[in-house]
Image: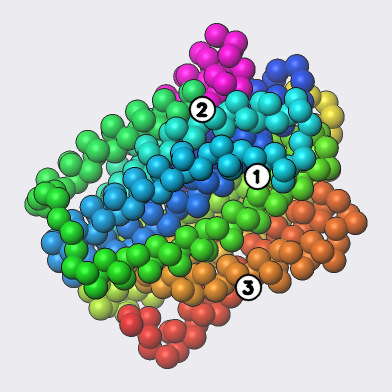
Amino acid sequence: MILSNITVPLLGLVDTAVIGHLDSAHFLAGIALGSSSISVLFWLASFLRMSTTGVIAQSSGEQDNEKLVGSLYTSVLIAICFALSLILLSPFLLQVIASLSNASNEVFTQAKLYFQIRVFSAPAAMLNLVLLGFMLGMHYGRGPFYLVLFTNVVNIVLDVLFVIGFEWGVAGAAWASLIADYAALGLSILLTINVANKHGLELKFSFVERAHWLSLLTLNRDIFVRSLILQLCFSFMTFYGARLGEVTLAANAVLLNFLMLVSFAMDGIAYASEAKVGTAKGRADPVQLQLWVKISLFWGALFALLYSMVFYFFGDWIIGSLTTIPEVIAAASIYLPWLVALPLVAMSCFLFDGIFVGLTRAKEMRNSMLTSALFGFFLPFWLTYSLGNHALWLAMSCFMGLRGLTLAYKYYQLSRQGALLA
Protein backbone atom coordinates (compact mmCIF):
# COMPACT_ATOMS: atom_id res chain seq x y z
CA MET A 1 0.00 0.00 0.00
CA ILE A 2 2.85 2.41 0.80
CA LEU A 3 4.60 1.61 -2.49
CA SER A 4 1.42 2.09 -4.51
CA ASN A 5 0.42 5.35 -2.84
CA ILE A 6 3.84 6.95 -2.87
CA THR A 7 3.81 6.78 -6.68
CA VAL A 8 0.57 8.80 -6.91
CA PRO A 9 2.24 12.21 -6.33
CA LEU A 10 4.41 11.51 -9.37
CA LEU A 11 1.43 12.66 -11.47
CA GLY A 12 1.54 16.08 -9.85
CA LEU A 13 5.32 16.13 -9.62
CA VAL A 14 5.78 15.39 -13.32
CA ASP A 15 3.13 17.94 -14.37
CA THR A 16 4.78 20.53 -12.11
CA ALA A 17 8.33 19.70 -13.24
CA VAL A 18 7.52 19.68 -16.97
CA ILE A 19 5.49 22.90 -16.87
CA GLY A 20 7.84 24.42 -14.24
CA HIS A 21 10.67 24.40 -16.77
CA LEU A 22 8.80 26.53 -19.28
CA ASP A 23 9.80 30.18 -19.50
CA SER A 24 7.09 31.89 -17.44
CA ALA A 25 5.52 31.54 -13.98
CA HIS A 26 1.98 31.91 -15.36
CA PHE A 27 2.16 28.46 -16.98
CA LEU A 28 3.03 26.88 -13.62
CA ALA A 29 0.49 29.03 -11.78
CA GLY A 30 -2.16 28.12 -14.37
CA ILE A 31 -1.63 24.38 -14.09
CA ALA A 32 -1.53 24.77 -10.29
CA LEU A 33 -4.95 26.43 -10.31
CA GLY A 34 -6.45 24.06 -12.91
CA SER A 35 -5.07 20.82 -11.51
CA SER A 36 -5.86 21.74 -7.90
CA SER A 37 -9.45 22.55 -8.94
CA ILE A 38 -9.76 19.14 -10.58
CA SER A 39 -8.13 17.52 -7.56
CA VAL A 40 -10.67 19.17 -5.28
CA LEU A 41 -13.55 17.74 -7.31
CA PHE A 42 -12.03 14.28 -7.66
CA TRP A 43 -10.97 14.13 -4.02
CA LEU A 44 -14.54 14.98 -3.06
CA ALA A 45 -15.28 11.56 -4.51
CA SER A 46 -12.87 9.89 -2.08
CA PHE A 47 -16.00 8.82 -0.20
CA LEU A 48 -16.47 6.26 -2.98
CA ARG A 49 -13.20 4.51 -2.19
CA MET A 50 -13.49 4.85 1.59
CA SER A 51 -17.03 3.56 1.90
CA THR A 52 -16.37 0.72 -0.55
CA THR A 53 -13.24 -0.39 1.32
CA GLY A 54 -14.95 -0.39 4.72
CA VAL A 55 -18.10 -2.20 3.61
CA ILE A 56 -16.24 -4.75 1.44
CA ALA A 57 -13.76 -5.53 4.25
CA GLN A 58 -16.55 -6.06 6.77
CA SER A 59 -18.60 -8.18 4.32
CA SER A 60 -15.48 -10.26 3.66
CA GLY A 61 -14.99 -10.75 7.41
CA GLU A 62 -18.64 -11.80 7.72
CA GLN A 63 -18.20 -14.10 4.65
CA ASP A 64 -21.37 -12.60 3.13
CA ASN A 65 -20.63 -12.77 -0.61
CA GLU A 66 -24.08 -11.60 -1.70
CA LYS A 67 -23.80 -8.44 0.38
CA LEU A 68 -20.22 -7.95 -0.85
CA VAL A 69 -21.08 -8.06 -4.57
CA GLY A 70 -24.24 -6.01 -4.09
CA SER A 71 -22.25 -3.30 -2.28
CA LEU A 72 -19.76 -3.18 -5.16
CA TYR A 73 -22.46 -2.59 -7.79
CA THR A 74 -24.23 -0.03 -5.61
CA SER A 75 -20.97 1.92 -5.31
CA VAL A 76 -20.45 1.70 -9.11
CA LEU A 77 -23.86 3.28 -9.76
CA ILE A 78 -23.20 6.07 -7.25
CA ALA A 79 -19.81 6.74 -8.92
CA ILE A 80 -21.34 7.05 -12.40
CA CYS A 81 -24.01 9.47 -11.18
CA PHE A 82 -21.42 11.61 -9.37
CA ALA A 83 -19.10 11.73 -12.41
CA LEU A 84 -21.86 12.77 -14.82
CA SER A 85 -22.94 15.48 -12.39
CA LEU A 86 -19.42 16.94 -12.38
CA ILE A 87 -19.31 17.08 -16.19
CA LEU A 88 -22.74 18.72 -16.43
CA LEU A 89 -21.83 21.30 -13.77
CA SER A 90 -18.35 22.06 -15.18
CA PRO A 91 -19.28 25.40 -16.88
CA PHE A 92 -20.71 26.68 -13.60
CA LEU A 93 -17.71 25.36 -11.66
CA LEU A 94 -15.34 27.29 -13.95
CA GLN A 95 -17.20 30.51 -13.14
CA VAL A 96 -16.82 29.77 -9.42
CA ILE A 97 -13.08 29.14 -9.85
CA ALA A 98 -12.67 32.43 -11.73
CA SER A 99 -14.49 34.46 -9.10
CA LEU A 100 -12.78 32.84 -6.10
CA SER A 101 -9.20 32.84 -7.41
CA ASN A 102 -9.11 36.39 -8.80
CA ALA A 103 -6.22 35.14 -10.94
CA SER A 104 -4.76 37.15 -13.80
CA ASN A 105 -6.08 36.59 -17.33
CA GLU A 106 -2.91 34.74 -18.35
CA VAL A 107 -3.12 32.36 -15.37
CA PHE A 108 -6.86 31.71 -15.64
CA THR A 109 -6.63 31.06 -19.40
CA GLN A 110 -4.17 28.21 -18.72
CA ALA A 111 -6.22 26.93 -15.78
CA LYS A 112 -9.43 26.91 -17.85
CA LEU A 113 -7.73 25.04 -20.69
CA TYR A 114 -6.51 22.34 -18.30
CA PHE A 115 -9.85 22.06 -16.48
CA GLN A 116 -12.01 21.77 -19.62
CA ILE A 117 -10.00 18.75 -20.80
CA ARG A 118 -9.42 16.99 -17.47
CA VAL A 119 -13.04 17.09 -16.30
CA PHE A 120 -13.98 14.48 -18.92
CA SER A 121 -11.83 11.93 -17.14
CA ALA A 122 -14.30 12.02 -14.23
CA PRO A 123 -16.14 8.74 -15.11
CA ALA A 124 -12.85 6.82 -15.25
CA ALA A 125 -11.50 8.46 -12.10
CA MET A 126 -14.69 7.78 -10.10
CA LEU A 127 -14.93 4.13 -11.18
CA ASN A 128 -11.25 3.64 -10.44
CA LEU A 129 -11.90 4.80 -6.87
CA VAL A 130 -14.64 2.20 -6.40
CA LEU A 131 -12.59 -0.64 -7.89
CA LEU A 132 -9.57 0.43 -5.84
CA GLY A 133 -11.76 0.32 -2.73
CA PHE A 134 -12.90 -3.20 -3.67
CA MET A 135 -9.31 -4.43 -4.06
CA LEU A 136 -8.27 -2.84 -0.76
CA GLY A 137 -11.27 -4.35 1.03
CA MET A 138 -10.31 -7.78 -0.34
CA HIS A 139 -6.72 -7.34 0.96
CA TYR A 140 -5.30 -7.39 -2.57
CA GLY A 141 -2.41 -4.99 -1.98
CA ARG A 142 -0.56 -5.78 -5.18
CA GLY A 143 -3.49 -4.77 -7.38
CA PRO A 144 -3.47 -1.09 -6.35
CA PHE A 145 0.32 -1.08 -6.71
CA TYR A 146 0.14 -2.38 -10.29
CA LEU A 147 -2.69 0.03 -11.05
CA VAL A 148 -1.06 3.18 -9.70
CA LEU A 149 2.34 2.32 -11.18
CA PHE A 150 0.76 1.71 -14.59
CA THR A 151 -1.20 4.99 -14.41
CA ASN A 152 1.90 6.98 -13.50
CA VAL A 153 4.06 5.43 -16.21
CA VAL A 154 1.44 6.21 -18.86
CA ASN A 155 1.04 9.75 -17.54
CA ILE A 156 4.77 10.43 -17.38
CA VAL A 157 5.43 9.16 -20.90
CA LEU A 158 2.52 11.14 -22.35
CA ASP A 159 3.46 14.25 -20.34
CA VAL A 160 6.92 14.32 -21.85
CA LEU A 161 5.58 13.48 -25.34
CA PHE A 162 2.74 16.03 -25.38
CA VAL A 163 4.32 18.92 -23.45
CA ILE A 164 7.95 18.72 -24.55
CA GLY A 165 7.73 16.71 -27.79
CA PHE A 166 4.53 18.17 -29.32
CA GLU A 167 4.81 21.49 -27.40
CA TRP A 168 1.14 21.41 -26.39
CA GLY A 169 1.91 23.13 -23.06
CA VAL A 170 -0.73 22.93 -20.33
CA ALA A 171 -3.22 21.21 -22.67
CA GLY A 172 -0.67 18.43 -23.20
CA ALA A 173 -0.46 17.81 -19.45
CA ALA A 174 -4.26 17.62 -19.25
CA TRP A 175 -4.56 15.17 -22.16
CA ALA A 176 -1.82 13.01 -20.66
CA SER A 177 -3.71 12.69 -17.35
CA LEU A 178 -7.05 12.06 -19.07
CA ILE A 179 -5.68 9.21 -21.21
CA ALA A 180 -3.87 7.76 -18.19
CA ASP A 181 -7.15 7.68 -16.21
CA TYR A 182 -9.01 5.71 -18.89
CA ALA A 183 -6.07 3.34 -19.42
CA ALA A 184 -6.10 2.72 -15.67
CA LEU A 185 -9.83 1.94 -15.75
CA GLY A 186 -9.23 -0.87 -18.22
CA LEU A 187 -6.59 -2.38 -15.95
CA SER A 188 -8.82 -1.87 -12.88
CA ILE A 189 -11.60 -3.94 -14.44
CA LEU A 190 -9.18 -6.76 -15.31
CA LEU A 191 -7.73 -6.78 -11.78
CA THR A 192 -11.20 -6.75 -10.22
CA ILE A 193 -12.31 -9.75 -12.27
CA ASN A 194 -9.10 -11.55 -11.27
CA VAL A 195 -9.72 -10.91 -7.55
CA ALA A 196 -13.34 -12.03 -7.83
CA ASN A 197 -12.35 -15.28 -9.53
CA LYS A 198 -9.72 -16.02 -6.87
CA HIS A 199 -12.31 -15.64 -4.10
CA GLY A 200 -15.07 -17.49 -5.92
CA LEU A 201 -17.25 -14.39 -6.31
CA GLU A 202 -19.80 -14.26 -9.11
CA LEU A 203 -19.93 -10.68 -10.34
CA LYS A 204 -23.46 -10.79 -11.66
CA PHE A 205 -25.45 -7.60 -11.23
CA SER A 206 -27.48 -7.39 -8.02
CA PHE A 207 -28.75 -4.82 -5.55
CA VAL A 208 -28.30 -5.07 -1.81
CA GLU A 209 -31.42 -5.03 0.35
CA ARG A 210 -33.05 -1.67 0.99
CA ALA A 211 -31.77 -1.27 4.59
CA HIS A 212 -28.17 -1.85 3.52
CA TRP A 213 -28.59 0.47 0.51
CA LEU A 214 -29.77 3.27 2.81
CA SER A 215 -26.94 2.53 5.25
CA LEU A 216 -24.40 2.76 2.41
CA LEU A 217 -25.89 6.07 1.23
CA THR A 218 -25.70 7.47 4.77
CA LEU A 219 -22.08 6.33 5.02
CA ASN A 220 -21.28 7.96 1.67
CA ARG A 221 -23.08 11.15 2.69
CA ASP A 222 -21.07 11.59 5.90
CA ILE A 223 -17.75 10.84 4.19
CA PHE A 224 -18.69 13.21 1.35
CA VAL A 225 -19.34 16.03 3.84
CA ARG A 226 -16.02 15.21 5.51
CA SER A 227 -14.25 15.32 2.12
CA LEU A 228 -16.03 18.56 1.16
CA ILE A 229 -14.78 20.31 4.30
CA LEU A 230 -11.25 18.97 3.70
CA GLN A 231 -11.20 20.25 0.13
CA LEU A 232 -12.62 23.58 1.26
CA CYS A 233 -9.48 24.09 3.35
CA PHE A 234 -7.12 23.02 0.55
CA SER A 235 -9.03 25.14 -1.97
CA PHE A 236 -8.78 28.13 0.34
CA MET A 237 -4.99 27.72 0.27
CA THR A 238 -4.96 27.72 -3.53
CA PHE A 239 -7.42 30.56 -4.06
CA TYR A 240 -6.02 32.80 -1.32
CA GLY A 241 -2.52 32.03 -2.61
CA ALA A 242 -3.68 33.24 -6.04
CA ARG A 243 -4.68 36.54 -4.46
CA LEU A 244 -1.15 36.89 -3.06
CA GLY A 245 0.27 36.79 -6.60
CA GLU A 246 1.28 34.25 -9.23
CA VAL A 247 4.73 33.69 -7.67
CA THR A 248 3.19 32.75 -4.30
CA LEU A 249 0.62 30.57 -6.05
CA ALA A 250 3.37 28.80 -8.01
CA ALA A 251 5.53 28.37 -4.87
CA ASN A 252 2.63 26.84 -2.95
CA ALA A 253 1.98 24.51 -5.89
CA VAL A 254 5.56 23.26 -5.59
CA LEU A 255 5.33 22.87 -1.80
CA LEU A 256 1.95 21.12 -1.89
CA ASN A 257 3.72 18.32 -3.75
CA PHE A 258 5.71 17.76 -0.53
CA LEU A 259 2.44 17.43 1.37
CA MET A 260 1.09 15.05 -1.26
CA LEU A 261 4.17 12.85 -0.86
CA VAL A 262 3.50 12.69 2.87
CA SER A 263 -0.24 12.13 2.56
CA PHE A 264 -0.02 9.32 0.06
CA ALA A 265 2.67 7.49 2.04
CA MET A 266 0.65 7.85 5.25
CA ASP A 267 -2.48 6.83 3.37
CA GLY A 268 -0.62 3.70 2.26
CA ILE A 269 -0.49 2.62 5.90
CA ALA A 270 -4.04 3.90 6.47
CA TYR A 271 -5.40 1.87 3.51
CA ALA A 272 -3.87 -1.29 4.93
CA SER A 273 -5.39 -0.56 8.35
CA GLU A 274 -8.80 0.08 6.74
CA ALA A 275 -8.83 -3.46 5.36
CA LYS A 276 -7.41 -5.07 8.51
CA VAL A 277 -9.61 -3.14 10.94
CA GLY A 278 -12.71 -3.68 8.76
CA THR A 279 -12.12 -7.44 8.58
CA ALA A 280 -11.49 -7.61 12.34
CA LYS A 281 -14.79 -5.80 12.94
CA GLY A 282 -16.60 -8.15 10.53
CA ARG A 283 -15.22 -11.09 12.53
CA ALA A 284 -16.11 -9.35 15.83
CA ASP A 285 -12.49 -9.67 17.02
CA PRO A 286 -11.54 -6.66 19.22
CA VAL A 287 -8.08 -8.03 20.06
CA GLN A 288 -7.03 -8.15 16.38
CA LEU A 289 -8.62 -4.75 15.78
CA GLN A 290 -6.57 -3.03 18.47
CA LEU A 291 -3.42 -4.89 17.38
CA TRP A 292 -3.69 -3.48 13.84
CA VAL A 293 -4.25 0.01 15.23
CA LYS A 294 -1.03 -0.19 17.27
CA ILE A 295 0.96 -1.55 14.32
CA SER A 296 -0.35 1.24 12.05
CA LEU A 297 0.61 3.96 14.52
CA PHE A 298 4.12 2.52 14.93
CA TRP A 299 4.84 2.50 11.19
CA GLY A 300 3.15 5.86 10.70
CA ALA A 301 5.41 7.53 13.28
CA LEU A 302 8.49 5.95 11.70
CA PHE A 303 7.65 7.17 8.18
CA ALA A 304 6.68 10.64 9.44
CA LEU A 305 10.10 11.02 11.05
CA LEU A 306 11.79 9.80 7.87
CA TYR A 307 9.91 12.34 5.73
CA SER A 308 10.78 15.22 8.03
CA MET A 309 14.46 14.30 7.81
CA VAL A 310 14.34 14.04 4.00
CA PHE A 311 12.63 17.43 3.66
CA TYR A 312 15.11 19.02 6.10
CA PHE A 313 18.21 17.80 4.28
CA PHE A 314 16.98 17.69 0.67
CA GLY A 315 14.06 20.13 0.54
CA ASP A 316 15.91 22.86 -1.36
CA TRP A 317 17.20 20.31 -3.88
CA ILE A 318 13.65 19.01 -4.47
CA ILE A 319 12.37 22.55 -5.05
CA GLY A 320 15.15 23.22 -7.54
CA SER A 321 14.30 19.99 -9.36
CA LEU A 322 10.65 21.01 -9.77
CA THR A 323 11.19 24.49 -11.18
CA THR A 324 13.97 26.66 -12.61
CA ILE A 325 12.12 29.97 -12.11
CA PRO A 326 14.33 31.95 -9.65
CA GLU A 327 11.55 33.89 -7.91
CA VAL A 328 9.47 30.73 -7.36
CA ILE A 329 12.49 28.88 -5.90
CA ALA A 330 13.20 31.78 -3.56
CA ALA A 331 9.58 31.99 -2.38
CA ALA A 332 9.23 28.21 -1.87
CA SER A 333 12.44 28.09 0.19
CA ILE A 334 11.04 30.66 2.63
CA TYR A 335 8.08 28.43 3.50
CA LEU A 336 9.94 25.09 3.42
CA PRO A 337 10.28 24.84 7.26
CA TRP A 338 6.50 24.36 7.51
CA LEU A 339 6.83 21.26 5.33
CA VAL A 340 9.66 19.90 7.48
CA ALA A 341 7.40 19.94 10.57
CA LEU A 342 4.16 18.90 8.85
CA PRO A 343 4.76 15.10 8.58
CA LEU A 344 5.09 14.76 12.36
CA VAL A 345 2.12 17.07 13.00
CA ALA A 346 -0.17 15.38 10.45
CA MET A 347 0.75 11.71 10.94
CA SER A 348 -2.05 10.74 13.32
CA CYS A 349 -4.85 12.34 11.28
CA PHE A 350 -4.08 10.17 8.25
CA LEU A 351 -3.85 6.97 10.27
CA PHE A 352 -7.00 7.51 12.35
CA ASP A 353 -8.88 8.32 9.15
CA GLY A 354 -8.03 4.79 7.98
CA ILE A 355 -9.02 3.27 11.31
CA PHE A 356 -12.42 4.99 11.32
CA VAL A 357 -13.04 4.01 7.68
CA GLY A 358 -12.47 0.37 8.65
CA LEU A 359 -14.92 0.80 11.51
CA THR A 360 -17.37 2.51 9.06
CA ARG A 361 -17.81 5.32 11.58
CA ALA A 362 -18.19 8.17 9.12
CA LYS A 363 -20.22 10.38 11.46
CA GLU A 364 -17.25 10.74 13.82
CA MET A 365 -14.96 11.52 10.85
CA ARG A 366 -17.36 14.18 9.66
CA ASN A 367 -17.63 15.83 13.09
CA SER A 368 -13.85 15.78 13.59
CA MET A 369 -13.30 17.42 10.21
CA LEU A 370 -15.86 20.15 10.89
CA THR A 371 -14.35 20.96 14.30
CA SER A 372 -10.81 20.98 12.90
CA ALA A 373 -11.73 23.23 9.96
CA LEU A 374 -13.43 25.82 12.15
CA PHE A 375 -11.02 25.90 15.10
CA GLY A 376 -7.87 24.47 13.53
CA PHE A 377 -7.82 26.16 10.13
CA PHE A 378 -10.02 29.22 9.77
CA LEU A 379 -9.62 30.56 13.33
CA PRO A 380 -5.78 30.47 13.27
CA PHE A 381 -5.79 31.99 9.79
CA TRP A 382 -8.14 34.78 10.87
CA LEU A 383 -5.93 35.54 13.88
CA THR A 384 -2.71 35.64 11.81
CA TYR A 385 -3.83 36.62 8.29
CA SER A 386 -1.52 39.65 8.36
CA LEU A 387 1.38 37.19 8.03
CA GLY A 388 0.29 36.43 4.47
CA ASN A 389 1.39 33.04 3.14
CA HIS A 390 2.86 32.06 6.53
CA ALA A 391 -0.68 32.32 7.93
CA LEU A 392 -1.87 29.80 5.34
CA TRP A 393 0.78 27.24 6.29
CA LEU A 394 0.22 27.81 10.00
CA ALA A 395 -3.50 27.21 9.51
CA MET A 396 -2.84 24.01 7.54
CA SER A 397 -0.51 22.70 10.26
CA CYS A 398 -3.04 23.42 13.04
CA PHE A 399 -5.80 21.85 10.95
CA MET A 400 -3.90 18.59 10.43
CA GLY A 401 -2.88 18.40 14.08
CA LEU A 402 -6.39 18.96 15.44
CA ARG A 403 -7.85 16.33 13.09
CA GLY A 404 -5.53 13.73 14.57
CA LEU A 405 -6.21 14.79 18.17
CA THR A 406 -10.01 14.72 17.85
CA LEU A 407 -10.07 11.31 16.14
CA ALA A 408 -7.58 9.83 18.63
CA TYR A 409 -9.72 11.06 21.52
CA LYS A 410 -12.87 9.58 19.97
CA TYR A 411 -11.11 6.22 19.43
CA TYR A 412 -10.03 6.27 23.09
CA GLN A 413 -13.63 6.92 24.16
CA LEU A 414 -15.02 4.07 22.03
CA SER A 415 -12.33 1.70 23.31
CA ARG A 416 -13.07 2.49 26.96
CA GLN A 417 -16.81 2.06 26.37
CA GLY A 418 -16.27 -1.27 24.57
CA ALA A 419 -18.08 0.19 21.52
CA LEU A 420 -15.46 -0.35 18.78
CA LEU A 421 -17.46 -3.24 17.26
CA ALA A 422 -20.85 -1.53 17.53
Reply above or below: 18 against 185: above
Label 1, on which residue? 96
Residue 124 visible in the current orientation: yes
The residue that disc 2 covers is 117
Mark 2 or mark 1, earlier in chain: 1
Query: In what element is the residue under mark 1?
Result: helix
Point 77% across, 58% down: residue: 394
* 384 sits to left or right of 86: right
| Image quarter in which the C terminus is found | bottom left
Residue occupying the point 70% across, 18% down: 22
Q: In the displayed structure, does residue 136 sit left or right of residue 388?
A: left
Q: Is residue 334 left or right of residue 257?
A: right
Helix or strand or loop: what does disc 2 sit on? helix
Residue 165, percent from left and from top: 55, 9
Q: Give above or below for 411 relative to 94.
A: below
Residue type at numbered disc 1: Val
The amino acid type found where label 2 is placed reads Ile
Query: Residue at coordinates 33% horizontally, 58% vertically from top-left?
Result: 53
Q: Residues within 10 Å of mark 1 (few under 14, many from 20)?
A: few
Query: Please, what secondary structure does the residue beneath circle 3 have?
Result: helix
* Mark in front: 2 vs 1: 1
Q: Which residue is mark 3?
A: 371
Marks 2 and 3, how far apart in space? 35 Å
Which segment did they paint magenta? 152-174
Q: Nearer the viewer, mark 2 or mark 3?
A: 2
Task: Identify the residue at the far right of this view.
Answer: 386
Does the magenta segment cover residue 159? yes
